[in-house]
Structures are given as structure tokens and as C-alpha cells.
Image: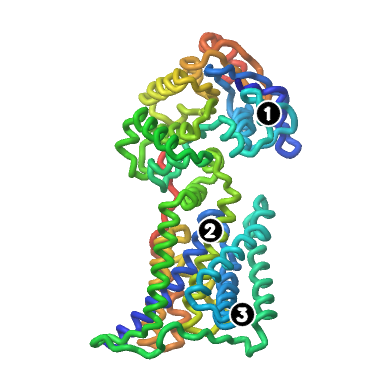
Amino acid sequence: MLLLSYLLLSGVTTGALYALVALGIVVVNKATGVINFAHGELFMFSGFVAWSLHVGAGLAYPIALPLAVAAGFALGVATDRIAFRPLMKADVISLVLATVGIAFVLRGVARVIWGGKADYLAFPPITSPEPVMLGEIMVIPQQLAVLGGAIVVMLIFAAFFRLTRAGKMMQATADNAKAATLVGIRTERIYTLSFGTGAAIAAAAAVLMAPLTLLYPDMGFAFFIKGFAAAVLGGLTSLPGAVLGGLTIGVIEALAGGYIHSSFIEVSAFVVIMIVLIVRPTGLLGVSRVRRV
Amino acid sequence: MLAIRHLKVAYGITEVLRDVSFEVPQGRIVALLGGNGSGKTTVLNTLTGLVKPVSGSITFEGKECAGLAPDAIVRAGICQVPQGREVWPGMTVHDNLELGAATRRDWPGIRSDLAEIYAMFPKLADRKKRYAGSLSGGEQQMVAIGRALMARPRCLLMDEPSAGLAPAIVGDMVDTILALNRRGLTILLVEQNIGVAAAVAEFAHILQGGEIAFSGPAAGLVDNPAVLRSYLGR
């Protein structure tokens, strides 16, 4: 019971972070049809920006977080301007390769700025790292803080997407870009907004995660793969699917690591994904694009 | 008045429109007919700014519109109801309509226009919260028309509004088009269905091979076997 509760909580916490990474991937993919391969690096870079603001410049964590999110948004916008907008008429392969290029540039720049200190930077914990016993359940305050933060970020994003005009325009552009253009929505702006929003969510994930682990310039790809897997599991264009996929992968990893062997952490999620995709090729919440005439 | 003069459009080296000129007088319904590949869709795409013309002019209410961006054209007062409805299937009817006013910021005006559209299409008022993709073809057509009206256009471009509708509903569509026109909207109707065009339009132009091949009163078209045979291949 103790082990199970511990594994579930840490699984859900990691899963919530995967879910945030996946949300960013889905937001960009829904709007533009492109998988942003620089997404992991946007996540990593924003984490380092938060480190510089919090540890380097001594700003309080609650101030460093929104600033890093803003930096993430700006990086996302830059990705759109450099790797997407000039290539909009090119084929998807060129677009994807351009995002891979951005990924390498960001990684290189991160090494130049934050490398050299054995390449691993520690982020101070935001709460006490000591576990607390709640009856039979062991709770680590740090994890609860991260989980709570992730839920808040998801709620803010959901409200933005469902309630604001900009959010609805993003949804409309994703649903049918031509119809969006015909009512006068400037879709190229919506693409920029999507890249920015996706990167901002990734930045929030990075800042939430940073106190749990170390920052290093190559961390982006590992998180990208997990987030991508979560997005695929959820159907690649479904926002609730991305959250569900992220949580599923986090929990499976934790359980496989705890009950089988720690070497199963990395592979277990992918085994499950393969099984899911064989049974349901559109993902858990994906829909095959059928339109009623 | 919408005036198209000497419009020439090419995709790469392929000339799609050679020299197209016609007018849609203020407050009238004009039909543009033609078979597949005649260039009808290109005329519409040029009017809405999706395609930039090589040469020629498009003036609306005296303002030059050729080559403007799509949102600028919507702001100038021209809005299209696309072929096949093209509603946003994953969004509610209400959100679909509301986003039709994407170019506007006069919130009280938007609210009163929404109420007016629900009054015009009571069926949509009943289905406000439903996903547009779950509606029938006829209802989706109402959403598409309502959405275009939310931009407060003075000229409506309608691309094959009768296509894909059950024959029983086509009559309703004709009534809707006439009702919109009575409210003062200038309408350019692009159709393959000559019956619909003849029922609503005063004047018709037939496009063939990127040129206007015939112009005349729409009422005469159905009885003109030469027109039907040579230009529409029937």
C-alpha cells in the first residue's frame, strides 16, 4: 500500500509534466499539422532561463515562473518566424527538418550559456524535500506542489482555449483553416500564436519540473519523446487525449519501475503505446476525420 | 456595386482566367455558371483574396479590392459562404456564428446580430450548444450562411449553396437566398444547378475555359438549348 501510493503519486506527478509537454505538441500540431521537433529544446531552454532568473538573478520562484513562461512564448514565436512561416508553402518534411534545426541551435546555445558546470545544474526545491506521512500514504510535498502547478497550468490553458476569442480562433483554424481565412481570421497569426502557446506550456512544465530534477542541455529530447508518445497515445490532435496520454505514461513508468525493475521505466510506456496503437490506431481519444455531408 | 474588369489569373504558367469582366449591381442577385474546371472557383478565390490576380481589377463600392488580403476583403464588406459549408465541425453552432464576426470589435452590435440570425434561423437557436459537425447538411448550410452574415457583409458570395443538399431542402435554400436579397444584400451566386440560378438570379454569366462565354437574363437560360448544350455540356 505504501509503495503503491508512493508510485502512483510520483507517476501522476511525472505524468502531469509529460501531459504538459504533450499539450504543447498537440496545440502546434492541431493548428499547423507539423510536429515541432524543437519542442523538447524549447522546454529545456525555458528551464534554464528559469534557473538564471531564480538562482542566477535571485528572483523568487513565483516571479521566475511567469517570466520563464513569457520567454518560452517568445521562443515559440521565434520558432514560427524562423522555421514555419517562411516555409509554409513547402512540404511537411522541410518544415519538420527546420524544427530539428531549431532544436540543435537551441541545444548549442544552451551549452554555450549554461554548460561548463559539469553540464548539470541543480534547481533548489520549492518546498521541503522531506516526505510527509498522511496515515498510510506517503506524500512528498514537492511532488504535490508540482502536481498542483501542472493542474493550474492545464486549467488556465483550457480556459484560454474554450473561453477567449483568440483560443476559439485557434480552434477554428485547427478545425478548418480555409473557413477561418474566409471569415477574416488571419491564420498566419494564429499559427504564430499556436507556436507561442505550445512553447509557453512547455516552459511552464520545465519550470515546474526543475526543482524535482537536474537541468542539462540534452534533457529536451528525452522529454520530447515522452511528450510525443503521450500525444500519440491521446490521438495527436486531442487536448484531453494529451493529458490522458501523459498521465497514463507517467503511471505506467512508475509502476513498471517499482514492481518490475527500474530498467523497465524507459521502455514500459512504449510497449503500452504499441499495444494501444495496434488496437486503436487513432489513439485513445483521437477521431478519424469523418465529416457529415 | 461589385465590378470585375479584365481579370486574369494564372497558377504558375497555367492561365485559369483569361479576361473575365462582369458586374454585380447593388442589391441584385447575379449568377455565375459553368461546368467543372471552367474557372468559377478561381473567380471566387480571387474575389476573397485567396488567390492574387495577374492583372485586372476588382472594385467594390468604388474601392479597389484586387490583391487585398482575405481579412481586408471581409472588412471591405465582401464575405463568402464556401462550397460544402465548411463549418467548424468540432465547435458549437454558437461559436461558429460568433467567430463569423472575427473582424469586428463592436460587441453590442455582434450580440444583436447574433440574436437576429437566431431569429432568422430558429432551428439554429434550438441547436446553439450542439457541435456544428453533428447537424444535417441543411442546418450546416444555415450555420455557414449565418456565420458569413456575422461579418456584416454588403455583398455575399455563395459557392454552390444547393450542392449536396436533399432536393426537398433546395427549395428552402432558394427562399433563404431571396430573403437575404430582400434585406438589401447584393449576391453573387456560383452554381452548377441552373434551376436554382434561374429561380433566384436576374442575370447570369456562363464561364467557360476561363472566359465569359454567355451573358443574359437568368430566366431565359433554362429554355435556351443552345446555351445548355454548348456551355454546360447537357
Q: Is residue B174 left or right of residue B65?
A: left
Rounded to the nearest angstrom, the CA distance separating label 3 from label 1 is 53 Å
Question: Of discs 3 and 1, which sits in the foreground?
Answer: 1
Secondary structure state at the residue bearing disc 1: strand
Label 2 crowd bin: few (<14), some (14–19), many (20+), radius 10 Å: many
Residue A231: x, y in percent?
Answer: 47, 65
Depth check: give the residue in front, B16 or B122.
B122
Residue A280: x, y in percent?
Answer: 40, 62
Whether residue A65 is situated above or below residue A79 in the rendered picture: below
Parent chain of label 3: A
- Lower sequence index among marks 2 and 3: 2
Secondary structure state at the residue bearing disc 3: loop
Rounded to the nearest angstrom, the CA distance separating label 2 from label 3 is 24 Å
Residue at 53%, 61% in the rendered image: A197
Parent chain of label 1: B
Q: Quadrant of the N terminus of chain B?
A: top right
On whether disc 2 and disc 3 are found on a single subunit, the reply is yes
Q: Mark 2 — residue?
A: A29
Whether residue A101 is situated above or below residue A27 in the rendered picture: below
On whether disc 3 and disc 1 are found on a single subunit, the reply is no
Parent chain of label 2: A
Residue B58 figure quarter: top right
**Residue A283, visible in the rendered structure:** no
**Amino acid beneath label 2:** Asn
Q: Mark 1 — residue?
A: B64
Q: Mark 3 — residue?
A: A217
Residue B212 figure quarter: top right
Residue B149: x, y in percent?
Answer: 47, 31
Residue at 63%, 58% in the rendered image: A80
The numbered disc on residue A215 is none
Q: Pointer 2 and pointer 1: residues touching (CB < 8 Å)?
A: no
Q: Pointer 3 and pointer 1: residues touching (CB < 8 Å)?
A: no
